[in-house]
Amino acid sequence: MFEWQFAIRGPSDTEFEGGIYHGRIQLPAEYPFKPPSFMLLTPNGRFETQTKICLSISNYHPEHWQPSWSVRTALVALIAFMPTEPGRALGALDYPKEVRRALALKSREAPPKFGNPERQTLINEIHQYMLSKVPPPIPQLPQTLVEHSTHGEGEGLQLNHHNGGAAAEGEFVEVVREFHWHGDLGPYRFGISVQLRTTRPVRNEPDAPRLPFVGDRILTYAAVGLIIAIGLLLLKKLLIANGYGAGGMGSL
């Protein structure tokens, strides 16, 4: 009755978001008049695993403990401490945010191994419950790839790639495609622009040519078709405005 198993979710809008972190609580016989001790079992990049955490809510600082605080209050405080600066506290770690994000993703794959079979069964059950309640983290978009299509009058569609910065393999980038089409109808000059946004993973293969995704082709064809359709509509309106009427359009 003095040893509890728990799991917490990583705080939102931080590198821990989407992570599932298991731990254990040891309550003293004098609880709630003396504080409990906490330790995390899931690698997280902020606290050492299987090491008692030194916080103002733990048994390392009994002078700060309030008997009115519950275990839930202490766990909420533990979540709030995760994105804070570690300082020199016992059991504190200061991993880079990228490593913490990777650990948050990895924490969802399987619960930690700890204790006897009965305890492990409990940990597994808690993990499955948390998976149903904690959504996975949103992939980070470290940069934007902008693909401009530029061409003069009467030329075909041409894509020129511009990369805003290097991205690590396995990360996600947002791809923005801008299609521009310009034309002349007698004394009239007009232009059409279409912008499409997609997200794709980064694959760094400098020695091998990159084959276009099927989705890329579909988006390109759709954009070109949309441009042609808009151009025909503009042409129809222009002919009607100049007195050719619907009959003139039907003869095209």
Image: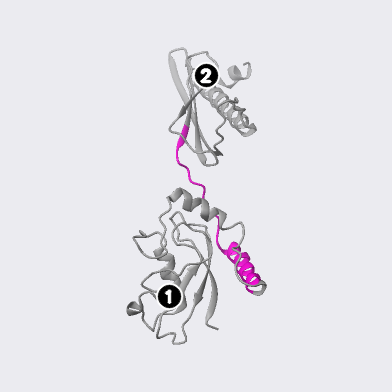
Residue depicted at 46% across the width and 48% down the height: 98
- Residue 59, which numbered label? none
Q: Residue furthest left?
A: 63
User: Which secondary structure, mark 1?
Assistant: helix
Q: Quadrant of residue 67?
A: bottom left
Front residue (pair 149, 117): 117
Examine the rendered structure and indicate whether residue 7 appears above or below residue 105.
Answer: below
* Quadrant of image for the C terminus: top right
Examine the rendered structure and indicate whether residue 164 appears above or below residue 190.
Answer: below
Q: Which residues are magenta?
A: 119-145
Q: Earlier in the sequence, mark 2 or mark 1?
A: 1
The residue under label 2 is which amino acid type? Leu
User: Which secondary structure, mark 2?
Assistant: helix
Q: Position of residue 101 (x, y in %)?
A: 49, 52
Mark 2 surroundings: few (<14), some (14-19) or many (≥20) residues within 10 A? some
Q: Is 139 included in the stretch rendered in magenta?
A: yes
Mark yes or no: residue 96 visible.
Answer: yes
Residue 187 horizontal side relative to residue 119, left or right: left
Mark yes or no: residue 137 visible.
Answer: no
Residue that badge 1 annotates? 73
- Residue 239, which numbered label? 2
Q: Is 56 included in the stretch rendered in magenta?
A: no
Q: Position of residue 109 (x, y in %)?
A: 61, 56
Q: Quadrant of residue 225?
A: top right
Residue depicted at 40% across the width and 59% down the height: 83
